[in-house]
Amino acid sequence: MSTHDYATYEEFGRKFFEVAVTADRVAEGFGTMAGDTFELGPFPAGPAGIARVTARVSIEQPQVTRRDGDMIAFDVRIPLDIDLLIDLRVDRSRFEVTGEIALIATARAAEPLLLIIDIPKPHRKDITVNVTSQTLRGELLRIVADVDSEIKRVIAKQVGRRIEAPEAQQAKVVDIGKRIASAWTGV
């Protein structure tokens, strides 16, 4: 007489994904980026590229929450802290910028026995920025130079490169077959 509560293969697979892919594990994967800083620019902005924009972007600790639904997916919010400098050659203005990248990470199964965390590259619409200036002149400069849009474009491009990097691609795939084979010795 068995004391096990048997499940179908489908039920087992679903339960496996629920246990293997959690918000904490996804956050841990993104957490490796926390504290990273990268420089952007100088890049042209505004009419005829009259302004030169330079930014130092710091990635803060991501927040990950499970989404409702049949798919095992997560909302990933990556806060950004940005030091921004706009150089007009005759004048330089500094800005304090906060921002956030909003992504959706989805757990997927693939052949032969792979668990993949699918993370699309961000687009401008996935990035929000809050630019503040201490002066009215700085605010006008920000609007005329269309700085918000340029920051979003450049950050999307930079983060997209990181997501597509070979080491990031490798980290998104867990070969369950290999893990089982290495654990199943002498059983």
Image (tube, rainbow, N blue to C red):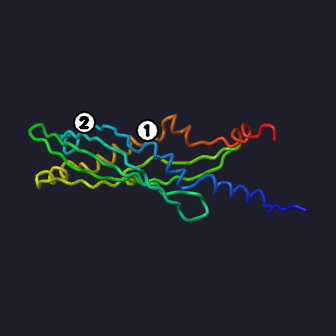
The first of marks 1 and 2 along the sequence is: 2
Residue of label 2:
42
Query: Whole-percent x and y of residue 126?
Result: 40, 54
The residue at the point 33 percent across, 44 percent down is 58
Disc 1 marks a residue whose amino acid type is Arg
Checking the image for residue 161, the label placed there is 1
Secondary structure type for disc 2: strand
The residue at the point 46 percent across, 42 percent down is 32
Q: How far apart are the two marked residues, 1 and 2, measured between alpha carbons? A: 18 Å
* Residue 123 vs residue 62, the one in the foreground: 62
Q: Is residue 43 left or right of residue 5?
A: left
Q: Residues within 10 Å of mark 2 (few under 14, many from 20)?
A: some
Total residue callouts: 2
Residue furthest out toward the top: 166
Query: Whole-percent x and y of residue 176?
Result: 68, 43
Secondary structure type for disc 1: helix
Query: Whole-percent x and y of residue 185?
Result: 78, 37
The residue at the point 11 percent across, 52 percent down is 137
Disc 2 marks a residue whose amino acid type is Pro
Residue furthest out toward the left: 90
**Split into 4 quadrants, where in the image is the C terminus?**
top right
**Split into 4 quadrants, where in the image is the N terminus?**
bottom right
